């Protein structure tokens, strides 16, 4: 099973793809991926200075929590060319209001963002404060 080290390494590899303009990533049932992995992935994505479109699905990543989603938001905030983002958090039970607020702060830094789709499906700890 893929864990934090694998996702962090993948993020570093992505960061080297300097001409990448579009990315579609799915992490599904990655039970060994936690906050460190997601934050590392975001750091790699943040290095992509030509990325204009991003679709990312976290599905049933049970060990991802607020710290990972906040770190991911910080990484996204570095994507100055991002125009379109499609983000799905599905059955991420450890993500709550603090994580979603951190994600929103990162997204708020994206001045070229014209299309945003966010889905929080069965994220039981996300309440009014997070949305």
Image: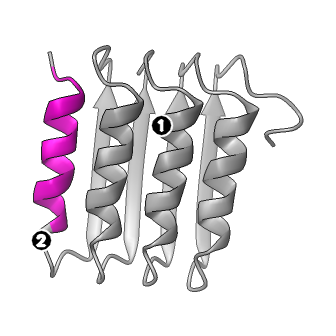
Whole-percent x, y for residue 56 in the image = 40, 48
Comparing labels 1 and 2, the label whose residue is closer to the camera: 1
Side of 112 relative to 29 (left or right): right
Q: Please say whether residue 10 is one of the residues in the magenta stretch.
A: yes
Q: Residue furthest right?
A: 128
Q: Which residues are magenta?
A: 2-15
Q: How many neighbours does mark 1 have within 10 angstroms: few (below 14), some (14-19), or many (20 or more)? A: many
The answer to whether mark 1 and mark 2 are in CB contact below 8 A is: no
Q: Please say whether residue 33 is one of the residues in the magenta stretch.
A: no
Q: Is residue 11 above or below residue 16?
A: above
Whole-percent x, y for residue 30 in the image = 29, 20
Determine the main secondary structure of the stretch shown in magenta. helix
The quarter in which the N terminus is drawn is: top left
**Which numbered disc flags the more N-terminal residue, 1 or 2?**
2
Determine the residue positioned at 54% across, 19% down.
91
Whole-percent x, y for residue 63 in the image = 43, 17
Q: Is residue 120 above or below residue 70?
A: above
Whole-percent x, y for residue 89 in the image = 53, 34
Determine the residue positioned at 42% across, 84% down.
81
The quarter of the displayed image where residue 110 is located: bottom right
The quarter in which the C terminus is drawn is: top right
Side of 40 relative to 115 (left or right): left
Q: Is residue 129 above or below residue 74?
A: above
Determine the residue positioned at 16% across, 32% down.
5
Q: Is residue 36 above or below residue 72?
A: above
Question: Which residue in the protein does label 1 denote?
Answer: 68
Number of the label disc, if any, that sits on residue 83: none
Question: Which residue in the protein does label 2 denote?
Answer: 17
The quarter of the displayed image where residue 106 is located: bottom right
Side of 4 relative to 119 (left or right): left
């Amino acid at each position: 099973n893929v864990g934090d080290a694998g996702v962090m390494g993948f993020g570093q590899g992505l960061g080297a793809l300097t001409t990448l303009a579009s990315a579609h990533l799915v992490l599904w049932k990655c039970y060994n991926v936690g906050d460190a992995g997601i934050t590392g992935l975001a750091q790699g994505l943040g290095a992509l200075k030509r990325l204009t479109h991003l679709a990312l699905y976290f599905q049933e990543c049970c060990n991802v929590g607020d710290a990972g989603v906040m770190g991911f938001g910080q990484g996204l905030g570095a994507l100055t060319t991002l125009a379109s983002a499609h983000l799905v958090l599905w059955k991420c039970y450890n993500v709550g209001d603090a994580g979603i607020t951190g994600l929103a702060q990162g997204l708020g830094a994206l001045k070229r963002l014209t299309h945003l789709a966010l889905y929080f499906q069965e994220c039981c700890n996300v309440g009014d404060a997070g949305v």
